[in-house]
Amino acid sequence: MKELLKRDEFSFIKKANKDFIIAFDAQMDVLGYTFDGSIVPGYCWGKYMIIYTKTGVKSRKSYARIYIRDEDIILRLYFSNVDKYREAIESAPDFIQEAFTGNFPLCNHCQGKTECIHQKRYTIHEKQYEVCDGRAFWFFKPELFQLTEYMKLFTAFYPQGRAK
């Protein structure tokens, strides 16, 4: 990853964001996840994105993505069955909880239809949330000092050696 980010097309990425990407990539590699050596176009999410899948598995299911934008990056983690991991979320720092309880992911995709297939429902701190799965679990402007908490959350949902 370090060598890849030295390419000219990635020169606009701030050093702090590159440091986060390199460290996150190293942690994901240890856990058995890969980006397959490709930083791809970001389409509507940013200039580029890095997509993490399970190493050695034919399925192309995303477990994490990093959206690289002109001024910053976004870490997006993919989670299901959130209620099962409520305790881990409720005991996490505010910057983690915000991705689950903030206004950004609140569902507006289907104008409040109760049977929306793009909705995730869960309860945090005794409050029920309905979020749009297209906007769920985005961590804006992640920083290197926060990496341990992101990895703690990720491994709560995906214990090492057991991807869902």
Image (spheres, rainbow, N blue to C red):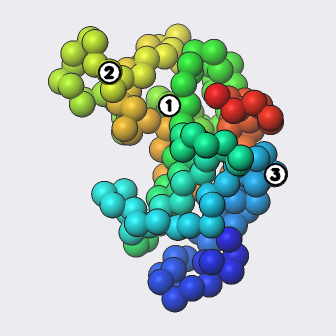
The 10 Å Cα crowd at callout 1, few under 14, some 14 to 19, many 20 or more, is: many
Where on the picture, by quarter, is residue 7?
bottom right
Can see residue 109? yes
Task: Give me the disc on residue 51.
Answer: none
Residue 147 at x, y percent in the picture: 71, 52
**Residue at the image position 33 percent from the left and 61 percent from the top:** 43
Residues 72 and 55: in front is 55
The residue identified by callout 2 is 117
Quadrant containing the C terminus is: top right
Image location of residue 102, percent across then percent down? 43, 34
Q: Earlier in the sequence, mark 3 or mark 1?
A: 3
Tag 3 secondary structure: helix
Q: Does label 2 or label 1 sit earlier along the sequence?
A: 1
Residue under the image location 48 percent in, 44 percent down: 138
Q: Amino acid at mark 3?
A: Val
* Image x and y of residue 58, in percent: 61, 43
> How far is the residue under mark 3 from the one under mark 1?
26 Å
Whole-Å distance between the Cαs marked 3 and 2?
A: 33 Å
Asked if one can make out residue 125 in the rendered structure from this viewpoint, the answer is: no
Where does the image place residue 28, in percent across and percent down from the top left? 72, 51
Q: Left of 116 or right of it: where is 69? A: right
Task: Give the residue displayed 73% in from the left and 62% down from the top.
Answer: 23
What residue would you read off at disc 3?
A: 30
Q: Nearer the viewer, residue 34 or 151?
A: 34
Residue at 80% over, 36% down: 160
Local SS, label 2: loop
- Secondary element under disc 1, as helix, strand or loop, is helix
Q: Is residue 138 left or right of residue 164?
A: left
Q: Please name the amino acid that badge 1 sits on.
A: Phe
Write down the residue under mark 1.
Answer: 100
Residue furthest front as drawn: 58
